[in-house]
Image (cartoon, grey):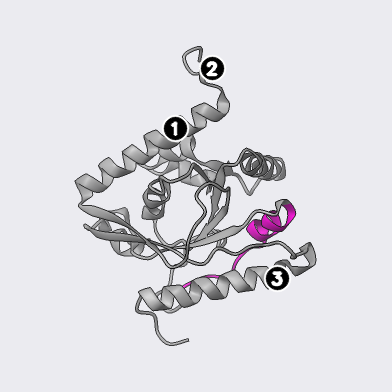
Amino acid sequence: MALVLPFGREKLSHRIYKICRYWSKILYFFLGVRHQEIYEAPHQFNQAHIFVGNHNSYMDIPPIVQLKHQPIKPLGKFESSKIPIFGWIYREAVIMVDRSNPDKRAESLRNLKKALLNKTSIFIFPEGTFCMTDQYPLKSFYNGAFKLAIELKVPIQPVLLVDTVERMHFNSVLTLTPGISRVVYLETIQVEGYTLDQVEELKQKVFNLMEQGLRRYRNYPPA
């Protein structure tokens, strides 16, 4: 413990983030996966954001930590820390939430706010779990990310994890395949002027933007 305390908690977190980034690059190299970022709109890298993305594969985690332009702390389910291979990276790199425990949920919220106030971006999957269907791009969103954005006046950065379900299907970790893994930055959503009474409006705006984007990049049936 004495070896890491001199760094301070925040510096240690950033160092862990860098280690996770290199880990994901090594993983991609051996799996034959190529990370690509596509920007449909400019992104302010020197500002903290609440990143929100679609969720349909365990391979959603490596591209998140490869967004190397700014430190990001993802929110992750406690149960995912038990996944073979990926479990250790979860325990070190994410803000974990145990939804079965109200005290732990409250602690996770405090940690998310602390990260944002320290100018560290956070990443949340607003669907809460995998979207396990080939018929619709997204499940309905929870309110948490949008309430947090309005409360702290932090912009929302929607991103699309376009190919992760192709790299590893949600049905099995044995479906790993090489290929491209695209991350698409959509338009940044500013929250100035929104109140907590407009959470549903903000949530629907982001949902529509992401759904339309996924339909552009992936072959979903017509809406």
Residue 200, label in figure: 3
For residue 88, say whether it is visible.
no
Residue 16, label in figure: 1
Q: Is residue 47 left or right of residue 30?
A: right
Answer above or below: position of 222 versus 171: below
Q: Is residue 113 magenta?
A: no
Residue assigned mark 2? 5
* Label 2, label 1: how far apart the Cα atoms are: 13 Å
- The amino acid type, in three-letter code, at marker 3 is Glu
Q: Which residues are magenta?
A: 137-151
* Label 3, label 1: how far apart the Cα atoms are: 35 Å
- The amino acid type, in three-letter code, at marker 2 is Leu
- Please tell me how crowded label 2 is: few (under 14), some (14-19), or many (20+) other residues with Cα within 10 Å: few
Q: Is residue 143 magenta?
A: yes
Front one among 72 and 139: 72
Residue at 68% from the left image edge and 62% from the top image edge: 191
Q: Is residue 64 left or right of residue 114?
A: left
Dot 3 or dot 1: first in sequence order is 1
